[in-house]
Amino acid sequence: MSQNTGPSRPSDCPPAGDGSRRAGGTPGSGRRLTVADVLALPVLAAGQPQVVTGVTRLDRPVRWVHITELTDPASFLKGGELVLTTGMPLPEDAAGIRRYVDELADIDAAALVIELVRRYHRPPDALVQACRARRLPLVTLARDVNFLEVTQLVHALILGNQTDAMRRTQRIHEAFTALTLRGGGPEEVVRAAAVMSGRTVVLENLVHQALICEPSGSTVEEVLTGWEERSRSAPPGDRTQTRGPEGWLVSPVEYQGERWGRVAMLPSPGTDAVGAAAAFSSEDVTVLERTAMALTIARLIHSTPWERTAHRSALRELTEQRHHSPEDARARFAALGLPTEGTVYRAVLADGGTFGDGAGLESRLSRELTALGRPALVGVLAPGRIGVLLALRPAQRWRPTVERLSRLVLGVDPGAVVSVGPEVTHLADAARSFRAADRVAEAALPGRPPPDGRSFHEQSDIGLRHLLYALRTDTRVQDFAERRLGPLLDHDSRHGTGLLTTLRHYLDAAGNKTTTARRGNLSRETVYQRLRTVERLLDCDLESGEQRTELHTALTALDVLRLG
């Protein structure tokens, strides 16, 4: 018996084992056994197998092995069998051979293996032509092979794989059941699906916006670029199946006839449409079906719509700069429907103590922007804080839109603060606009409305008082105010004098003593006397412009520190 470990083949054909390597894994690794796997087994390799036709179809799964010497073996087959024959029952005429092959192809036999030892020493031309016409893999064996040993070994592998597959399927069900019982949200569900399958999984809504994306082996940019167009080319279906030119495995997410979207599992990068259908295993189907079921349950028990969750997640990733690259961020937001071409961006923050979880106001702001026809993402960024990312055309007026949003916020919480960041031209810079809006919010003085009759705050509003208010928790500011004014405050406290008030009037009057006297309802002589006392207590020269500036800054800091 030959000691060859692989089949011989024509020089222009890949080895039969290539199908196994393309499909990944080895026999018994848990995936489906393929024709290439069986041909690579030592018991068959000893027969010097040669692939005559169907070399590109060696990744076909083998459901069973069938030995036959019948002229009509197809009547005993169900599909997926590897048919072994000595060639003895083949018809003599070409028409009979074509009928024999057609019957095998019609029931979807995995492959035909013929031994060239007893009746034939080369495959009949009619057999080769018929198998090539029906794309049925035809494999010849140059040496005698114990077919019974082949069936025993292959069937053991198949049954072992089936047992392993049952165990893995059980683990899949258990994992999703546990996830559902602990109330996992849609992001957890999609992430679990990607981890279990090792594939990219995307949840989209009915208008083909990618709401949640968990890439595997790809970047977000690669997965989501042109998402809507690509998704629309994969028409919806009523069950889990491969769809579209890219061969996505998709499953609808619905409840009692109401469809909310679908979840898609993408084939590995580089897989063509022909190979995509075979790329997914029964376990992938199980994972996706359980994903769709878990998403349905998550939708029922979590009141927040998917779109709101997606907007929140995207905005948090943006503000915290958790995107892997600017290109990923661009693809992510484009897949959510935000314009990314010919667009500028501006951040808006709403901070209030009575927003609750923010979901109600979040929805109202989103509806208002939709009514205005303004593309934007709206999401709760933290308790008591809602973020809005406006996408605007260059030179488009943004103030009326922000004014509408601000008045809506103040209608819910009159004490809320709405702040606006600067315009940025690139989505990757939007985090900078949010940071600037945050600084504006920190500097907004409580109880003091913005200037110019506006209801929102912007960077131009920040003066010395606002800046010091934003820095009020900095101990250096506190120390500065105490060092410069502490002795004066102590003197007023011990003696009941109003030297601090006199100093305030003096600084507000830009050093004019007459105006100081009038504002304090004091005589000029009293003012002179008090100012000399101030200079002595503070060891300063009030005629010095620099020292007056320091005292004015310290006094302003004291005021904002007292605001709390």
Image (cartoon, helix red, strand yellow):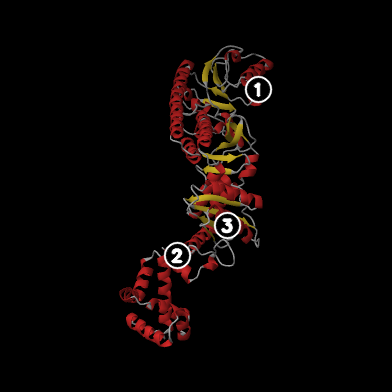
| Residue visible at 56% across and 50% down in the picture | 378
Q: How many marks?
A: 3
Question: For mark 3, does the 10 Å Cα neighbourhood hold few (<14), some (14 to 19), or many (20 or more) residues?
Answer: many
Quadrant in which the C terminus appears: bottom left
* Amino acid, disc 2: Ala
Q: Identify whether 442 is placed above or below 275.
A: below
Q: For the residues carrying marks 1 and 3, which lies nearer the camera in this image?
A: 3
The dot on residue 470 is 2
Going from the N terminus, do you reach mark 1 or mark 3 first? 1
Q: Could you tell me the amino acid type at mark 3?
A: Ser
Q: Height in image: 327 above or below 441?
A: above
Q: Quadrant of the N terminus?
A: top left
- Few, some or many residues within 10 Å of mark 2 (<14, 14–19, 20+): some
Q: The residue tagged with tag 1: helix, strand or loop? A: helix
Name the residue carrying label 3.
406
**Between marks 3 and 2, how big is the CA–CA gap?**
21 Å
Q: Nearer the viewer, mark 3 or mark 2?
A: 3
Residue 488 visible in the picture: yes
Where's residue 186, x and y in %? Answer: 51, 39
Residue farthest toward the left in the current orientation of the protein: 494
Q: Does residue 438 lie above or below 140 as drawn? A: below
Q: Which mark is residue 130?
A: 1
What amino acid does circle 1 point to? Ala
Residue 175, how many percent across, how many down?
44, 32
Image check: 139 left or right of 5? right
Residue 330 drawn at (x, y percent): 57, 52
